[in-house]
Image (cartoon, grey):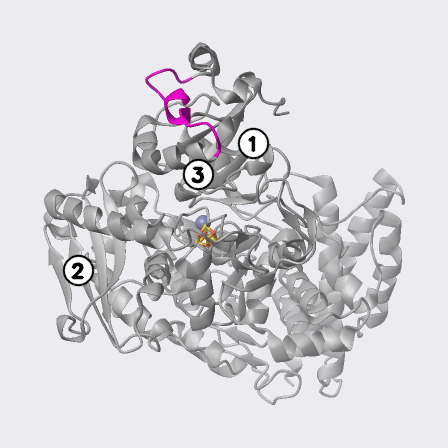
Amino acid sequence: MSKIIASAAIRGAHSIVNRAGKDYEEALEKWGPDQKVGFPNTAYYLPVIYGMLGIGVEKIGDMKEVIERCRLLLPPLVREKMHLPYLGPVLDAGMATLFADEIIEAIRYLKDPGFYLTGEEVTDNQIWLGAADDVILRKRGVEFVDGTAPGFAVILGSAPDPQKAKDVAEELQKKNLYVFMHADNKGVRFSEQLVEAGVQVGWPTRLVPFGPDPTSVCFAAGFAVRAAMSFGGLKAGEFRKILIYNKDRIFAFAMALGLVTDEWYAQAAGAINFGFPTIADTPIPEILPTGVCTYEHVVSNVPYDQLVSKAIEVRGLKVTISEVPVPVSYGPAFEGERVRKDDLYLECGGGKSKAVEWATTKEMNEVEDGKIELFGPDITDVEAGSRLPLAIVAEFAGRKMQDDFEPILERQIHHFINYAQGMMHIGQRDIAWVRIAKDAVEKGLALKDIGSILHAKFHEDFGAIFDKVQVKLYTEDEKVNEILESARGVYAIRDSRIEGMTDEGTDTFYSCTLCQSFAPSHVCIISPERTGLCGAYNWMDCKASNEINPTGPNQPVDKGECLDQKLGQWKGCNDFLFKASRGALDHYNFYSIVHDPMTTCGCCECIAAILPLCNGIMTVDRDFRDMTPCGMKFTTLAGTIGGGFSAPGFVGHGKYNITQRKWLSGDGGIKRLVWMPKHLKEEIGPRLKKEAEEMGVPGLLDMIADETVGTSEEEILPFLQEKGHPALSMDPLL
Ligand code: SF4
Ligand code: ZN
């Protein structure tokens, strides 16, 4: 162990602990011992202190004991003539540093409540996210457990320039790591460099600006401690187990970029306790012999372009990255990234042009594996800010391929395209929506790359169920319309496969959690008569998907005891929901919009809303862009309730679901339907008529108002009265 490092780390620890002591004294004087302190929305108090010492700091008075423990842990400053200190005292100094960090940061929350943001996203003028609350912990922490994210990089300081910062961040993202950013180097901070280089920071892109000072490292350590407690089932005070859990399970390391100060050394010493080594780009002394960390503890003077690979090697991570042959970075870390209007090069779909995607099966001799064709103009043929219609057709062949697999393969297009940096995908089927960023086009991304992505990823993830796949892309109106026509015919056949099945007739429903990457608490549970709200997954599809991928996002849900027959609530579903939403929800009703409806995510084909004056329900689909009688347009509705919540009065659903017998049956079903857009009425008209006849209201279709009647409750009410709409004589909705 280097004496220089040991001395510096111990000096740094002394200075931070002293500062914590001072902050504590001041706070005590100002607010008194009973003043509440803590990080926002967490059950783990100040988590490093809580996990390691078992002390739950709730009030300023509780900090006293912690400061005393810090002082006990602090080894004496290293004197010139002393023998080489060994690792033990340095580790203790590191631990004391993290405790003191938490005290300093908790007092900062008290003194300056607006200093840190809450939630996952940064704003235009503020980027410091501070301590992750328990919602973020549950959502993101589980990724460390299931391997979606192998771990995280703790960055201190800054890169030589913004471009280099961007390169390092992207390399880490590509390895699916989270990047936690702290402290400055000569006044420059890594996270600010990323913003300057036009990179989106925040939890959704895994680039997390925790705080401007070295003390914010405790937020990273606190995240690791809570992950161990929450997912590893460890208790407060089980410090050895918590540290070992992290060493063995969480692949993390620190990167010290720039001048390493005493305080940084102290933080690095804290990280070594967790088995997290430090990699530096400056020639600081190294701690090469191994002990606590898997390999070396501190490795220094690593050239910039080798930092990430060195870190990976030192921490001993095996990463598997599928090389997708596209000119932009590719991986799940880019899924949450958005392409905003200003960054937009090309847009397809989204209401302004048509876009459709379709997976279909062909004969063996009709498919040439890996063949990708584009019919019509490419990105390079249009100017920035353009729109094109788009049809994506993936044609599969194989001995094991079945029609049943088509919807499952088709639904993957959403994720596969989203994984590409600079590409955003929303929706599905005939309401797909693709955005491509200027940056990506600059790097050489072209439309054919969609084909390369699909070919590579379909083989990687679903190679077992087909042999060959080719992709055709169309960007000419006439051809796109033709594909739309054929695809719609097939969608109808897929939808109707479920006809005749009832919810009562099966004990097993299926979950779908594909959309949790955007709406973390969103859980679709799909029953035969309650198709997924995206319209792309029905019960059959989920069943087939589960057969292909038994550990995937579609799990069988044993519906269990019926708790409410009318509203559609089952114990087994509730239990599943609680687990799958990571505790965010413990129940919802399948058949109600008024009482605790199902959660809604941004993919929904339609959103229903109650219209109190009309004693009824309206619904609007994504293609209708004008005002609706509930006072909101589709986009506003989706923005308000599409984040994975259960929002009484509103619920997302598929188009096909409207004519399923159980659609909102707990509130009166289609007899409540008083308004919907004209084109939707036409689209589902024949089926709605049939359904209405079965319900004993044969003339219902003509009693439903649309935008030609009015777009406010007042405007449509006289029409409903004149037609004698059944909703008007039903029990009050509320
Ligand atoms: Fe699955 Fe529901 Fe998302 Fe459709 S909306 S993909 S069913 S989670
Ligand atoms: Zn969704």
Drawn side of residue 325 relative to residue 322, left or right: left
- Mark 3 vs mark 1, CA separation in Å: 12 Å
Of the residues under marks 3 and 1, which one precedes in the sequence? Answer: 3
Q: Say whether residue 62 is magenta.
A: no
Q: Position of residue 545 (x, y in %)?
A: 43, 66
Label 2 sits on what residue type? Answer: Lys
The prevailing secondary structure element of the residues shown in magenta is loop
- Residue to which mark 2 is pinned: 472
Label 3 sits on what residue type? Answer: Ile
Q: Position of residue 571 (x, y in %)?
A: 69, 54
Label 1 sits on what residue type? Answer: Gly
Q: Which residue is pictured at 77% across the width and 73% down the height?
A: 239
Q: Which residue is pictured at 53% across the width and 64% down the height?
A: 555
- Residue to which mark 1 is pinned: 668
- Mark 1 vs mark 2, CA separation in Å: 45 Å
- Residue to which mark 3 is pinned: 658
Q: Nearer the viewer, residue 400 or 476?
A: 400
Q: Say whether residue 705 is magenta.
A: yes
Q: Which residues are magenta?
A: 695-711
Q: Secondary structure at mark 2?
A: strand
In the depicted structure, whether residue 586 falls above or below residue 407: above
Q: Position of residue 643 (x, y in %)?
A: 52, 43
For the residues carrying marks 3 and 2, which lies nearer the camera in this image? 3
In the depicted structure, whether residue 358 falls above or below residue 305: above
Of the residues under marks 1 and 2, which one precedes in the sequence? Answer: 2
